[in-house]
Amino acid sequence: MSSDQAAPADETAPVLAEDKPRRGWLTFLRDVVVIVLIALLVSFLVKTFLVRSFYIPSASMNQTLIENDRILVDEITPRFGGYDRGDVVVFRDPGGWLEKAPQVPVSPFTESVEWVLSLVGLAAPDSDEHLIKRIIGVGGDHVVCCNALGQTTVNGQAIDETAYLNLLPGKTAPDVMEYDVTVPDGSIWVMGDNRDNSQDSRFHQDQPGGGFVPVDNVVGRAFLITWPFDRFGLIDFHHEVFAGVPAPEAAP
């Protein structure tokens, strides 16, 4: 080999020291991006199929839920077990229950942030398009107002709702608003706990849906208050109130 001929490159030469930190940072950033994407995917799947967040836009469920409470809604359990009397449920407007809210302009940045947060269930920009009430009657139930004490009867059995109704001092029952309905299969009859201030099934009897909410419109069962923190806790369904109600086929 002549002295002026270049020696072959050493393929085993070590990587320059300054390249190591750069490759380390690239690997770290790649791992962070992968973790974030996986977390977003998992959160999206949870929000879509398991649990969803909503806020309470009105006072119709006082004092069980008050305005601006944030809640979690169980979307999957009712798909297997159905809904029971007493359950507090979130549902899409069956048609004509909600007035069209005026469109409030928001900046593209705010809209983008809300959209991203809604994907993972941390924001609920469509809460104003949903309602939340308590189930009083399920498919086949005969729901009537009222007996001599002002109580609703379900399949002939009076229910004592004083455990959760929001009544003015001195009142023992809500104002009487007559209804005598049989709930169609696949639907529910719902009313708000703030009974004298709730535009619920009673107020929509003259509409095509008869005041009934199709089960297909129900998003899920609300089960937990998450905010404000001093109200954190499980939502009481008060199933004991309905314990004595006979099945529809056994009702007189």
Image (cartoon, helix red, strand yellow):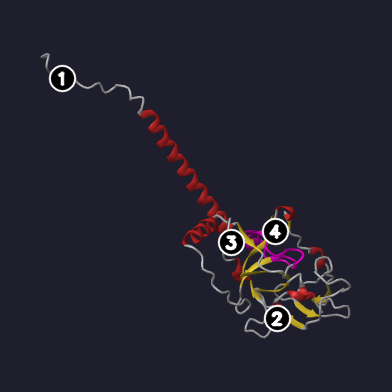
Quarter holding residue 101: bottom right
Mark 3 or mark 4, earlier in chain: 3
Residue placed under numbered mark 3 in the picture: 124
Give the foreground label among 3 and 2: 3
Mark 1 or mark 2, earlier in chain: 1
Answer few, some or many: residues within 10 Å of disc 1's Cα (few below 14, many 20 plus, some between 14 and 19): few
- SS at mark 4? strand
Answer few, some or many: residues within 10 Å of disc 3's Cα (few below 14, many 20 plus, some between 14 and 19): some
On residue 203, which mark appears?
2
Quadrant housing the C terminus: bottom right
Q: Which amino acid does label 1 sit on?
A: Ala
Residue reaching furthest bottom? 206
In the image: residue 189, left or right of residue 114: right
Tags 2 and 4 touching, CB below 8 Å: no
Tags 1 and 4 touching, CB below 8 Å: no
On residue 6, which mark appears?
1
Q: Which amino acid does label 2 sit on?
A: Phe
At x 54% / y 56%, what residue is drawn? 117
Residue 72 drawn at (x, y percent)? 65, 58
Q: What residue type is labelled 3?
A: Ala
Give the foreground label among 2 and 4: 2
Answer few, some or many: residues within 10 Å of disc 2's Cα (few below 14, many 20 plus, some between 14 and 19): some
- SS at mark 3? loop
Cα gap from disc 3 to disc 2, whole angstroms: 26 Å
Magenta stretch, residue numbers: 62-88
Check residue 68 for magenta coloring: yes
Cα gap from disc 2 to disc 4, whole angstroms: 26 Å
Note whether 244 is above or below 71 in the view shown: below
